[in-house]
Image (tube, rainbow, N blue to C red):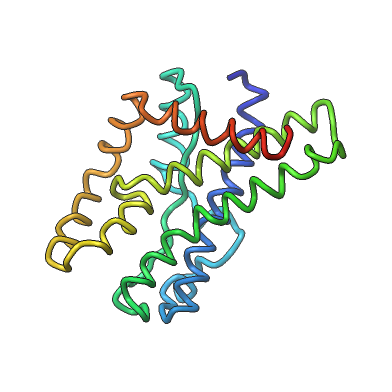
């Protein structure tokens, strides 16, 4: 990825992960937890959302390692799952809302391409936005702590085991990097983006 691609990629990534986190916060608030709003996290201002690891270190490391895809994440919005009503269903809804927002963004970016409303350089930028949001949406649904999919999986466990499973989040960066470097995600995101591009005739 050259410097020009990086300059295009990073703003799209930042915008996409901010929308992802805001959606977590809004759904949590609707279900009874206003922690994120109280912390001033329901905002498009990027500064409160930047995470040194997820927003800077991880994308930079993937770029350095020559990863076939790049992604990152924002500083997670604070959610007190105990405040949600209903609690476990609330955890599922809050967790899935982030990926849902990325899939919706992917569709929004795809539609101008489908109907031929843009071409050339702008079309390439829109394609990057589509792929990036698909990657974010799919990756966050994986059941690896601290990704959103792990919280969805945790709700299927008895409380005693649920909290033990969620404690694995302390090893989250290591677990995520092991999975990324294993190459297992590449066929997953290739399959999803391939199907999506065929559906939207991109």
Residue in the image at 78% along x and 37% along y: 113
Residue 187: x and y in percent read: 44, 27
Q: Relative to 125, is 101 on the left or the right?
A: left
Residue 141: x and y in percent read: 41, 48
Nearest the viewer among 47 and 162 is: 162
Q: Relative to 151, is 162 on the left or the right?
A: left
Residue 3: x and y in percent read: 63, 21
Question: Seen from this angle, which residue lies furthest left?
Answer: 160
Quarter of the image with the C terminus in it: top right
Residue in the image at 36% along x and 24% along y: 183
Question: Seen from this angle, which residue lies furthest right?
Answer: 117
Q: Relative to 45, is 115 on the left or the right?
A: right
Quarter of the image with the N terminus in it: top right
Residue in the image at 31% along x and 50% along y: 146
Residue 5 to residue 47: above or below: above
Q: How many marks?
A: 0
Residue 131: x and y in percent read: 60, 35
Residue in the image at 73% along x and 34% along y: 201
Q: Quadrant of residue 110?
A: top right
């Amino acid at each position: 990825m050259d410097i020009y691609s990086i300059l295009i990629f990073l703003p799209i990534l930042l915008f996409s992960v901010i929308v992802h986190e805001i959606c977590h916060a809004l759904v949590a608030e609707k279900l009874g937890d206003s922690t994120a709003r109280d912390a001033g996290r329901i905002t498009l201002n990027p500064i409160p959302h930047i995470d040194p690891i997820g927003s800077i270190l991880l994308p930079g490391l993937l770029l350095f390692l020559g990863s076939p895809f790049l992604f990152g994440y924002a500083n997670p919005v604070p959610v007190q799952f105990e405040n949600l009503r209903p609690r476990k269903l609330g955890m599922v809804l809050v967790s899935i809302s982030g990926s849902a927002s990325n899939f919706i963004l992917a569709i929004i970016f795809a539609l101008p391409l489908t109907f031929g409303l843009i071409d050339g350089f702008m079309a390439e930028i829109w394609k990057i936005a589509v792929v990036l949001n698909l990657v974010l949406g799919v990756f966050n649904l994986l059941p690896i702590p601290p990704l959103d999919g792990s919280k969805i999986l945790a709700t299927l466990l008895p409380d005693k085991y649920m909290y033990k499973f969620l404690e694995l989040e302390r090893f989250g960066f290591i677990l995520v990097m092991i999975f990324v470097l294993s190459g297992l995600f590449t066929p997953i995101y290739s399959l999803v983006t391939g199907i999506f591009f065929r559906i939207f005739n991109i």
